[in-house]
Image (tube, coloured by chain):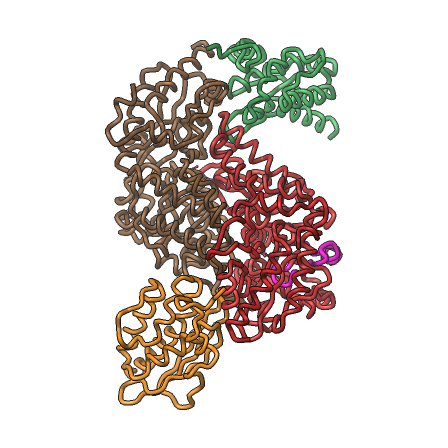
Chain colours: A brown, B red, C green, D orange
Amino acid sequence: MSAAVHQVGFDIERIRADFPILTERVHGKKLVFLDSAASAQKPRSVIDTMVRTMETRYANVHRGLHWLSERCSDDYEAARDKVAAFLNAAREEIIFVRNTTEGINLVAQTYGRSALKPSDAVVVSEMEHHANLVPWQMLRDQHGIDLRIVKITDAGDVDFDDLERVFTDGRVRLLAITHMSNVLGTYTPVARLAAFAHERGAKILLDGAQAVVHRAVDVKAIDADFYVFSGHKLYGPSGIGVLFGKYALLEAMPPFMGGGEMIRSVSFATSTWADPPFRFEAGTPAIVEAIGLGAAIDYVDSIGFDAISAHERRLTDHALATLATIDGVTTLGRAQDRGGVVAFTLEGIHAHDVATLLDKQGIAVRAGHHCAEPLTRRLGVESTARASFGVYTTLDEIDALAVGLRRVQQVFGR
Amino acid sequence: MSAAVHQVGFDIERIRADFPILTERVHGKKLVFLDSAASAQKPRSVIDTMVRTMETRYANVHRGLHWLSERCSDDYEAARDKVAAFLNAAREEIIFVRNTTEGINLVAQTYGRSALKPSDAVVVSEMEHHANLVPWQMLRDQHGIDLRIVKITDAGDVDFDDLERVFTDGRVRLLAITHMSNVLGTYTPVARLAAFAHERGAKILLDGAQAVVHRAVDVKAIDADFYVFSGHKLYGPSGIGVLFGKYALLEAMPPFMGGGEMIRSVSFATSTWADPPFRFEAGTPAIVEAIGLGAAIDYVDSIGFDAISAHERRLTDHALATLATIDGVTTLGRAQDRGGVVAFTLEGIHAHDVATLLDKQGIAVRAGHHCAEPLTRRLGVESTARASFGVYTTLDEIDALAVGLRRVQQVFGR
Amino acid sequence: MNIATTEDLYQSLIMDRARSPRHAGRLDEFDAEAEGDNPMCGDRVHVRLRREGGKIGILCHETRGCAICISAADLMGDAAIGKADTEIHDLADAFEAMIVTGVIPDRLDFLDLRALAGVHAYRSRHRCATLPWQALRAAIGKTMELRHG
Amino acid sequence: MNIATTEDLYQSLIMDRARSPRHAGRLDEFDAEAEGDNPMCGDRVHVRLRREGGKIGILCHETRGCAICISAADLMGDAAIGKADTEIHDLADAFEAMIVTGVIPDRLDFLDLRALAGVHAYRSRHRCATLPWQALRAAIGKTMELRHG
Ligand SMILES: Cc1ncc(COP(=O)(O)O)c(C=O)c1O
Ligand SMILES: Cc1ncc(COP(=O)(O)O)c(C=O)c1O
């Protein structure tokens, strides 16, 4: 049924053919992969780019005067250009890191320790992934900043009244908040949040780990100060991620790690730092992975975010509607603007059992607190199952999930 | 000529056939890759393992209850077992990092800030790579430790008299030193250094970035407290490296970065940390790269370090002997025990010009200060050229270097 | 499709115990107690036991968790009753080994614990099955401390 | 094998200037000076100049570096002499653009600077060629500051 429903210009079968893993069988069943929000599968073009780099153009970057090193450096820096264009930033504002987590820790440890005073406050929301909570707790414990939590509404949106409240004493210097919740699917109104923070003399850091996969992001239009994402969720390689920072902020920040590449000059007595972005890329970078991320960006660009967003919208609507027809299934989050993740509970059945029993039918979902333990507690649940969607997800796969959930209920005699 | 000289059991042609890039041509010439110390080329088994992971067994690790995630977690943890066996360590003592640089920064920022007091001293040698100097300078500037430099002899060995001197006041708590110099080729006597440090109440960190490629390393036999290396120099992927630490030390260390995976439990108020090694692996790791590193270790194990060391010895001896026959060429370092890197200068010709002119003949060498600027200055040179060897390097390639250097001299009319 | 086959994890024995555990509840008078929890998924097992003649006479558990965890706690109750403390550790070792290897040990006192051998195939679920045993070991350890202290 | 072909980097013009630069030396009396250095490789260029009638009359450089850097400094001397400060920036822009693009600009005052177009192909050597110009720009900037200050 699904193929016919898909709009012209989004040929789901052709897209699926780009992902070799989708033809795998699991426990003798067709794989139904609904765990893309944890990490997405890789299209052939990304894999091929990595292989081609290692087979024909590999050497360490920047330091070499020979052909392979020059070519590999060109490819690595071209990937930086692609990321810059992807976010509408300048290339000097793009720092390659391992993942979203490292990007946020980098900001906490460099910007946090240099630009924030112990009396300053940082605000995060109730729906943050651990990656955007724990680094600030560590900064609080090391450096003495005040860490504040802004509430979300029961629908799962940022509570602007509460935001006013946490900002009232004028001590907030940074709002660090997700662009899209990995549990509730909520898209936060980032341009409005940025304006809100800036009016009150605070900077804004956006955790784009989920958002960047589903929507075009323009850091200039948002007026983001920092923006962070992971390559592995964007159909790119593991081991590579991106921190965007406004150049003036980066320029004033001390380095995060010391070593090769990030220095201008070193003596036994002292060292001087290179300019951004190199100041923040110590040692041999994840070369092949950065180049692979460039290929992933080319891939999503070739589909286009209009098509990707529309596809995601269709899948999410279909999932919410379908799950609503199953007695005992409760979906979480009712945000106005939501993306392609649907967390849910089954009455009387633990999410772990749901995930294992779905797995036996070839259906991969995640279960647990999704690295957002305080949010799960806030929602009053122990753990949830979560289905999440990628460009290769079909409406049929959502129907398969529904059938699978009914089978789970049967096993539990419900 | 070279094939005949090679001993039985080391079939260089078969080894070369394992590395697809070696058949590339550069400027129309056969590639002669003599830059392995910067980053080694990748055998097909490493590339294939990465591809197979992405095409058939990829998902995020640890957090998933489904088949792909279980399989991918198994593979990731099996790679940790391989690294543990490789170093003769326990699996809980193996932390995956991006590279040597991150490993050393991790120790400086966690062990350094928690176990060292501002009055304590850290000792590094005159021949350290920036990766083992700058992190300690940063710790000094942030935390107030005393950073001391132990001299090397003119031959390029650790000066034990000077080591006695820097340790005399009893304030040294950590000796952080290379296991093999990337410029002079010097192997340091690591077991002796460890005993020296331990007798004086100090711990020892070894920078194994170069050594681990050429020799079997047994951290127990050495009695190393910390040992660090990079995957990309060991024929493995970029973006992955290893920090070994004795479990008791790791257990007492606070985390480096905060986020998913490294926590036991998180609430808005506070978080508790997971045990090592997970405490130090925040966020989604370089999954495919760790698995690829496992394949690289399998690869070097299949050749065996006896054969690898003997091959390297033969190449180094041949290179030193051959370069000695060219007027105007000076090689650096005369350590008793030395590994497969040979740095050299050409009289009256800048190392950059040497590298570019060799490149035009297809020969890849490195030129500059090799991220050891203070050492280069100590040696009284501005920059040097460096040829370095891998398992795939042949004696013929060293002869080609000699021919190439004579051509460079011709261009300069020397 | 038949999900609940005999070699399967969610066989009727496990589902029966998960739905209607025999040892669930809270002893008011007890000789030892302990709690095990797994913050990664929120599973929690609280074990209380009473001794009779140096052996475990009654064991009750309050378990909040998945079907594997509840049935593991309940089947543990069957097997633990009538055992001395030293025997418990031995039994727990055998159970944990079965979960890791999938091999059912050849011992008579294992009773229905063998039903959980299928957990072996799901490494991420091992903790669900072993958590009750961790709590029981802790409870016994605490009694012993009390006795020695 | 003929390494030094005409489209090549190490052509005779560059090698001549690297071996026997015409403008090498140290002016004792000068109107402006500056140093450029590249710590990554240790290249260093010290430029001093003297004016005659509002134009550069003499330019001397002391360069420690590779053949590209020395010849670039020396060919810069040829081209800079006789120019006013404003013209220097324009010329430097054109030179830097040629290094990045490899395209030789169509201007008469470019003289032998075109010999360095081949540096284009070696991105890691760009700095070697542009370092002297960076020093010259700095020297001019400092004079202007003095004049205004
Ligand atoms: C001795 C030594 N230490 C440290 C490093 C840094 O390694 P990486 O850049 O992989 O962090 C290198 C390599 O460049 C090295 O040769
Ligand atoms: C919203 C959000 N932030 C941060 C992260 C952390 O990403 P990573 O593990 O790649 O650092 C994730 C993914 O797990 C996420 O969904």
Where residue A46 appears, as percent x and y from the top left, is: 42, 40
Query: Would you place residue D24 above or below residue A132 in this image?
Result: below
> Relative to the observer, which residue lies in front, A285 or C127?
A285
Q: Name the residue rendered at 71%, 68% in the picture.
A: B162
> From where the camera sits, is residue A398 visible?
yes
> Relative to the observer, which residue lies in front, A20 or B64?
A20
Quadrant location, ligand no. 2 = top left
> Relative to the observer, which residue lies in front, B14 or A77?
B14
Number of marks in picture:
0
Quarter of the image with the N terminus of chain A is top left
Where residue A401 appears, as percent x and y from the top left, is: 39, 20
Where residue B281 appears, as percent x and y from the top left, is: 53, 42
In reply to whether residue B172 is colored magenta, the answer given is no
> From where the camera sits, is residue A172 visible?
no
Q: Residue placed farthest to the left in the image?
A: A8
Query: Would you place residue B248 above or below residue B62 in this image?
Result: below
> Relative to the observer, which residue lies in front, B209 or D132?
D132
Magenta highlight range: B181-207
Quarter of the image with the C terminus of chain A is top left
Describe residue B248's horizontal placement relative to residue B103 as left or right: right
Describe residue A297's horizontal placement relative to residue B2 as left or right: left
Describe residue A60's horizontal placement relative to residue A214 as left or right: right
Where residue A333 appears, as percent x and y from the top left, is: 33, 28
